[in-house]
Image (cartoon, coloured by chain):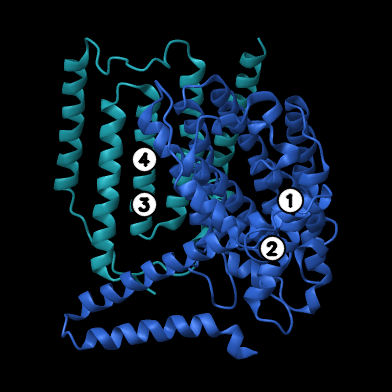
Chain colours: A cyan, B blue
Amino acid sequence: MSTPLVLTYVGFFVMAAITLGGALMAVSARNLIRAALGLIIALIGIAGIYFVLEAEFVAVVQILVYVGAISILILFAVMLTRGLMKRDLPAQNAQWIAAAFISLAMFAALLYVALSTNWRAVETQVAGDLIPKLGTELMTTYLLPFEAVSLLLLAALVGAIVIARE
Amino acid sequence: MDFFDNIFTNIYAWLAFWLHELLMGWNLPKDVESALVSAIMIILVIIVIILWMVLMVLILIWLERKNAARIQDRVGPNRVGPWGLLQPVADTIKMLIKEDILPENADRFVHTIAPMIVMMPPVLMFAVIPWGKGMVPVDLNIGVLWIIAVASIGTIGVFLGGYGSNNKYSLLGGMRAVAQMVSYEIPQVLTIVPIVLMVGSMSLVKINEAQSGWFGMQWFVFAFPVGTIAFVVYYLSALAEVGRTPFDIPEGESEIVAGYMTEYSGMKWALFYLAEYFNFFIVCVIGATLFLGGWNGPILPGYVWLVAKTYALVLLGMWIRMTWPRFRVDQLMNFAWKVLVPIALVNIVLAGVALPIFKMIGF
């Protein structure tokens, strides 16, 4: 059953608003825990956009990895760092002008790429269950990068344990 | 029996059709009309799911109090309604009219939003469960992965609740809760892997279908040894994940008052309390769906079977809760990392070895 187009638009705008609101909160909050909360809201909004685009697997992995794992890591890092738990920390430092310029340049570059690309609508519908195909590809064509990533994660895990033991 | 089996799907189809007919008279453009019908039906399904959740959890609370009383040689609630059946309703009204106290210097926003975040995962998980034949609100082809993913959102809520209260006991409870939930999530996820291997799909509907037939012998608990081990490890880590008594370190009354809920009162506290029961109920539903054949069963309609199996698991959990003492923190962590995780990992290897052999024999 395909979703009616109107609902897709409504869903997209709601999710985009959530993402932007969360992102705004993440950069403007004076309290790091609140900033992290804003980031989590923005990440959930992005997962929602993936859902609207019917990329369920990407959406679920977004929630699993970013909302479930990375944001908890950020919260833990904030809690375990001395002095970061204070209520009011300045949201800007002396380098905010440079940061603003770089962000603006980045935004301009992205905007240029987005506007100058000739977006084509894909006519053919991707058929069937994509997860088995993804799994097969990961285990055959992309085996080496896949294993390299797992080795990297293993090294990070062992490294974290070694640092925590000291 | 077909009538009862299909009653809810028929009501759904009939309502959608009736809505369609009703809107025909308004002469709307075709897209707008179909969008309106879809939107209204989606909202209806959401309302039904939430009402269903609330009903189930009210029964659960009553059952828990009655059971606790029986095991501890008491009578339990028996004043409001027959056998005290209306006690949860009275409790709810009491909670609603209680004063909402905000601790001094607490982070008002975080303090308020934490219970709402805690309520998110169970509602999201209820949406992908196949409750009966054709009764799955959202049929995701990655249902299992969805359940794993949204379950981790609750951790954030508990943590924020602990932080936002500006209380050392709350903070300690929050930290403990996060450590426990993150640890027990791992064996829980690892036990689902053999099931996915056996079915070859992550869709909960497909997992259910794979367990039909053979008079229940096709259930994955009976897929000895892989399924049985997976079920036991799943159930134990699920109990720990929702923080039921042998594993209720995050809110151990004798050590840290009430953990992350210490500073909560009124309806916010009730939300935490309800979320705990929702989570307990939903992990039992998932256990029944993954290992006990879901809604498959003879004679009675599918949804009755699922609820019956779920309540069997719920009663087992209550029995464990009432009869076991609380673990220490180190025992809890050791149990997760040194017992459950290795067993689950070996179980996956076992499944990987056993499955091709079974396939070769033509099982």
Q: Say which residue label 3 marks.
A: A48
Viewed as shown, does residue B244 lie left or right of A150?
right
Residue under disc 1 on the same chain as residue under disc 4: no
Q: Amino acid at mark 4?
A: Ile
| Residue carrying label 1 | B235
Badge 3 sits on which subunit?
A
Instruction: Give the labeled residue for mark 4.
Output: A41
Disc 1 vs disc 4: Cβ atoms closer than 8 Å? no
* Residue A49 in sight: yes
User: Which residue does the image show at 52% across and 36% down from the upper left?
Assistant: B158
Mark 2 or 3: in front is 2
Q: Quadrant of the C terminus of chain B?
A: bottom right
Amino acid type, residue under disc 1 in the picture: Tyr
Q: CA distance from mark 1 to mark 4?
A: 31 Å
Residue placed most toward the observer, B69 or A37? B69
Q: Nearer the viewer, residue B215 or B164?
A: B164
Horizontal and vertical percent for residue B92?
52, 52
Residue B294 visible, this orientation: no
Mark 4 and mark 2: Cα distance apart in space = 33 Å
Same chain assignment for discs 4 and 3 = yes
Look at mark 2 in the image and give the residue it sits on. Answer: B310
Vertical arrangement, residue A13 with respect to residue B328, above or below: below
